[in-house]
Image (tube, grey):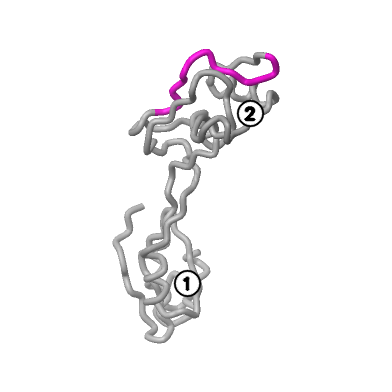
């Protein structure tokens, strides 16, 4: 991305655009908008989206799957408002470490099973199970680090780079 914007004043596509390139390292992206910087900053200051956790994320709460038939939400809603997991998922759940078995074509647990505890770093099997039960534990947000304003031909640093 930095190369496309221009690394030096001689290569840059707009005046002083190369001063934005030091901020383009790590987990960053570019947004091009005709909106004013104030409106974009205001929008992203309040923007968050719930997402499924990935491996390495810390669990935000305890999740325990209740004994008996395993339901699609993993006990998050009452059983009379849920549907049992399809029997075809049972081998996958076992592969991910959940001690399930089939009883009369229903995926079951012999006792309550703890999927994760609050504060625990999640592994890939736990995150796959959380996703299969529809339990989101991560939050996506956008942090504006710096922006280029073509009207003033300047780069304004909003927040220090953290990644």
Q: Left or right of 87: which side holds 70?
A: left
Q: Nearer the viewer, residue 137 or 163?
A: 137
Residue stretch rendered in magenta on the structure: 104-116
Using the rendered view, name the quadrant where residue 19 is placed: bottom left
Instruction: From the top left corner, tell me how far across and down residue 53 is, in percent.
Output: 47, 41
- The extreme front residue here reads 80
- Tell me the chief SS of the magenta region: strand
The label on residue 85 is: 2
Using the rendered view, name the quadrant where residue 43 is placed: bottom left
Q: Which residue is mark 1?
A: 6
Question: In the image, which is nearer the foreground, mark 2 or mark 1?
Answer: 2
Instruction: From the top left corner, tell me how far across and down residue 67 is, in percent.
Output: 50, 19
Residue located at (63% from left, 25% from top): 92
Instruction: From the top left corner, tell me how far across and down residue 62 is, in percent.
Output: 38, 31
Residue located at (51% from left, 35% from top): 77
How many marks overall?
2
Using the rendered view, name the quadrant where residue 87 is placed: top right
Instruction: From the top left corner, tell me how far across and down residue 97 is, in percent.
Output: 53, 20
């Amino acid at each position: 991305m930095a190369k496309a914007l221009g690394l030096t004043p001689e290569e840059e596509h707009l005046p002083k655009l190369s001063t934005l390139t030091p901020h383009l390292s790590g987990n960053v992206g570019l947004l091009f908008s005709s909106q004013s910087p104030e409106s974009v900053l205001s929008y992203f200051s309040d923007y968050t989206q719930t997402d499924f956790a990935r491996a390495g994320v810390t669990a935000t709460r305890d999740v325990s799957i209740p004994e008996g038939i395993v339901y699609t939400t993993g006990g998050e809603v009452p059983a009379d408002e849920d549907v049992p997991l399809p029997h075809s998922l049972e081998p996958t759940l076992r592969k991910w470490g959940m001690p399930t078995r089939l009883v009369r074509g229903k995926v079951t647990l012999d006792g309550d099973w703890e999927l994760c505890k609050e504060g625990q770093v999640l592994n890939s099997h736990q995150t796959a199970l959380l996703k299969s039960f529809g339990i989101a534990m991560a939050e996506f947000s956008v942090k504006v680090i710096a922006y280029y304003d073509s009207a003033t031909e300047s780069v304004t640093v909003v927040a220090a780079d953290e990644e």
